Image (spheres, rainbow, N blue to C red):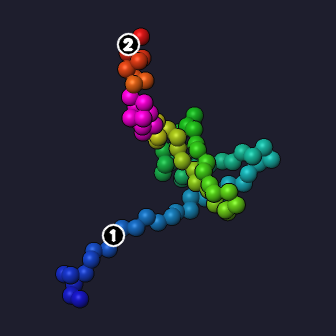
């Protein structure tokens, strides 16, 4: 296979360790500053924790990123609800 026919390498996402945080006796933790900056996490943001029961990992999502998506999805699933509000 010559150089021209080789497929170009796609950039793959890589996991970055932003830091660690101990969990307090009240279940609280501090989000490392590097992660807050990288993900634009602001005071007052709501975070969603997801995971598979029995597994050793979880994912944290910023709920604010889903705001527009959930509104659009709701309008797609219940288009009549939007009309009813306008009619009132």
**Residue 3 x %, y %:** 22, 84
State the image quarter where residue 78 is shown. top left
Measuring 56% from the left and 62% from the top, which residue is drawn there?
Answer: 17
> Where's the C terminus, which quadrant?
top left
Q: Is residue 46 something one can see in this rendering?
A: yes
Measuring 60% from the left and 51% from the top, which residue is drawn there?
Answer: 50
Question: Few, some or many C-alpha atoms within 10 Å of disc 2 (few <14, some 14-19, many ≥20)?
Answer: few
Query: Considering only order in the chain, which callout, 2 or 1, is on the residue closer to the N terminus?
Result: 1
**Residue 57 x %, y %:** 64, 60
Measuring 19% from the left and 81% from the top, which residue is drawn there?
Answer: 4
- Label annotation for residue 87: 2
In three-dimensional space, the C-alpha distance between marks 1 and 2, rounded to whole angstroms, equals 50 Å
Residue at the limit of the structure toward the left, as seen here: 4
For marks 1 and 2, give the one nearer the viewer.
Answer: 2
Looking at the rendering, the stretch of residues picked out in magenta corresponds to 69-79
Residue at the limit of the structure toward the right, as seen here: 25
Give the residue number, with chain letter if any, for mark 1.
10
User: Depth check: 20 or 10 in front?
Assistant: 10
State the image quarter where residue 26 is shown. top right
Q: Is residue 50 left or right of residue 65?
A: right
Magenta segment: does it hold 52? no
User: Depth check: 83 or 23 in front?
Assistant: 83
């Amino acid at each position: 296979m010559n150089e021209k026919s080789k497929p170009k390498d796609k950039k793959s996402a890589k996991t970055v360790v932003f830091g660690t945080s101990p969990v307090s006796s009240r279940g609280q933790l501090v989000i490392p500053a590097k992660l807050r900056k990288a993900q634009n996490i602001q005071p007052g943001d709501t975070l969603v924790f997801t995971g598979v029961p029995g597994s050793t990992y979880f994912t944290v999502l910023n709920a604010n990123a889903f705001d527009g998506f959930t509104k659009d999805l709701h309008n797609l699933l219940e288009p009549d609800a939007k009309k009813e509000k306008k009619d009132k």
